[in-house]
Amino acid sequence: MAFPTDENVIVGLERADDAGVYKISDDIAIIQTVDFFTPVVDDPYSFGQIAAANALSDIYAMGGIPKTAMNLVAFPVNTMDMSVLRQILEGGIDKIREAGAVLIGGHSIEDKELKYGLSVTGFIHPSRVLTKRNLNAGDMLILTKPLGTGIVNTAIKGGLASPEVIERATRLMAALNKDAAEVMQKYPVHACTDITGFGLLGHLAEMVIGSDLSVRLMANQIPMIIEAIEYARIGFVPGGAYKNRTFRQSMVEFSSSTDIFVQDILFDPQTSGGLLICVEKNSAEPLLNDLHHKGVTDAAMIGEVLSVPEEKIVVD
Ligand code: CO
Ligand code: CO
Ligand code: CO
């Protein structure tokens, strides 16, 4: 398929990334993204927060600042109380406000199935756009949120997740990637994406493909919701995790010591996951400390970029 384009498109559909980027002037480009989905938690206000944080995240993943947002709503008017919708929108508005952006419009339709999300526009300097490309040999990888929310969401639907774990996962999914994105601006970051539907290994694969490099992950350094390993063991692994594995397993080499359920978590589709930041080696430790000081306490150094041209992901 051929897409219409022009010389001001910095990131377009030819090179699928977290968001599209279009240059307005020499100093400013707009970042545009849209995301919406069906509820992942029962509480309407929390769902609104999570859906908004998830939509805003792609602006942060490009290195930008969110400026304007528009609501996208599909609502079963005849079967659901309007107060539910009001709480969802409240959750979204609170996240937009926290992001320092404004809500300037939206669109709603009647639908059998509830859906909510945002389209978001952000600003960035055209020369500071962070795509999934540009890994350098020796770079280090930092992940800013623990993995496992897809498995926890599956366990919630199965009625097995404990209230504490639901609370923790909800807090993680509702957390903006704002602080992490602000901190990384001060460091020589080469590439960035956010972890969503393809899971850590799926999104990392997108970074590795075409790089002529490989990546080594240290499984025991990767932050995880520890209970997700238990839930995976009982079988609460979402179908998307298996799809992600089938799609990318030819690129991944697990060491024999990597637990099969830990592997599931590395493929687990995330809702509103953290940023995966690829940073110059000498700045990795200072960036990680800075993230911790700014409250991104789950951030961890999880791997490194190798000058091995096979485009493999080795998990030790
Ligand atoms: Co993204
Ligand atoms: Co997205
Ligand atoms: Co990016």
Image (tube, grey):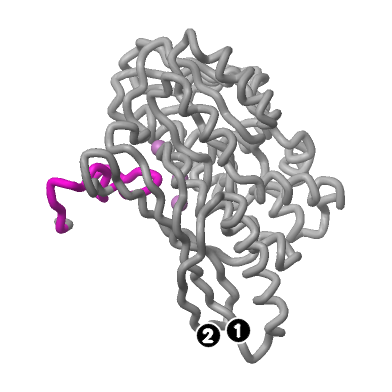
Quarter of the rendered image showing ligand 1? top left
Which element is circle 1 on?
Answer: loop
Are discs 1 and 2 less than 8 Å apart at CB?
yes
Observer-nearest of 31 and 172: 31
Percent across and percent down for residue 59 are 44, 46
In the image, is residue 188 above or below residue 106? above
* Quadrant position of the N terminus in the picture: bottom left
Is residue 307 located in the magenta-colored stretch of the structure? no
Q: Amino acid at mark 2?
A: Glu
Q: In 3D space, how far apart are the residues under numbered discs 1 and 2 (Cα atoms)?
A: 6 Å
131 relative to 231 in the view: left or right: left
Residue named by callout 1: 76
* Quadrant position of the C terminus in the picture: top right
* The magenta segment: 4-21
Which element is circle 2 on?
Answer: strand
In the image, is residue 129 above or below residue 20? above
Q: Amino acid at mark 1?
A: Pro
Is residue 10 located in the magenta-colored stretch of the structure? yes
Q: Quadrant of residue 211?
A: top left
Q: Residue at x 50, y 40 (%)?
A: 194
How crowded is the residue under tag 2: few (<14 C-alpha within 10 Å), some, or many (20+)? few
Q: Residue at x 31, y 45 (%)?
A: 16
Residue named by callout 2: 110
